[in-house]
Amino acid sequence: MNIGSRPAKRRPSGGIETLRAIPWIFAWTQTRFHLPVWLGFGAAFKQVLDKNAKKNLSMLQEMYNQWPFFRVTLDLVEMVFAKGDPKIGALNDRLLVSKDLWPFGDQLRNKYEETKKLLLQVMLKSLQHFIVLNSFQKEQDTVLSHDDDICGVLKL
């Protein structure tokens, strides 16, 4: 059944490289890891801060406070972190990925945490608002894990 205006792939016979943007982003959203959204931010922030941490952190904070486009962009990345849960990615790795690739997933999750930390430094925010949303998510995960109709894999 075709439920979209376009096919998911550019070429039906192609592999993952032929996926269009919407199914690609949707797939990462389902993993709760949102890799395409945040991956470059941490590296960019780290490079800028490595050159002159105090001066450049102040500059990034000023940009966040005074440049609407920069602020909205960082706010959107922050929202992605609020919705994300790298533990789901770790669970997916254990269930779906060959063991020899698990260290790669660990590296990505470390980059995720580093990027979140740098983002919050620039925004002058704490992790408190992440904790509230993720606590609610964990509560819902617990409810689901006690439902015998749900696949036992969801037990976290």
Image (spheres, rainbow, N blue to C red):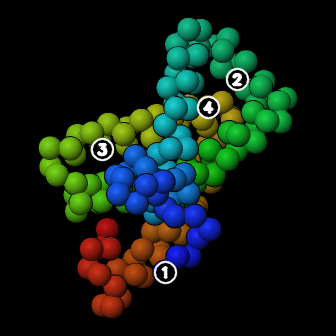
Cα separation, mark 4 vs mark 1, equals 46 Å
Residue at which label 4 appears = 121
The kind of secondary structure element at disc 1 is loop
First in residue order: circle 4 vs circle 1: 1
Of the 4 image quadrants, the one containing the C terminus is bottom left
Percent position (x, y) of residue 96?
23, 60
3 or 2: mark nearer the eye = 3
Percent position (x, y) of residue 72?
76, 42
Residue at which label 2 appears = 60
Cβ–Cβ under 8 Å for marks 3 and 2: no
Cα separation, mark 4 vs mark 3, equals 24 Å
The kind of secondary structure element at disc 3 is helix
4 or 3: mark nearer the eye = 3
Residue at which label 3 appears = 105
Identify the amino acid type marked 1.
Met
Q: Which disc number belongs to residue 1? A: 1
> Nearest the camera: 7 or 71?
7
The kind of secondary structure element at disc 4 is helix
First in residue order: circle 2 vs circle 4: 2
First in residue order: circle 4 vs circle 3: 3
Identify the amino acid type marked 3.
Gly
First in residue order: circle 3 vs circle 1: 1
Q: Is residue 10 above or below residue 59?
A: below
Percent position (x, y) of residue 7?
52, 64
First in residue order: circle 3 vs circle 2: 2
- Toward which corner of the image does residue 107 lie, by quadrant? top left
Q: How busy is the neighbourhood of tag 3: few (under 14 within 10 Å), some, or many (20 plus)?
A: some
Q: Which disc number belongs to residue 125? A: none
Identify the amino acid type marked 4.
Gln
Q: Is residue 120 above or below residue 3?
A: above
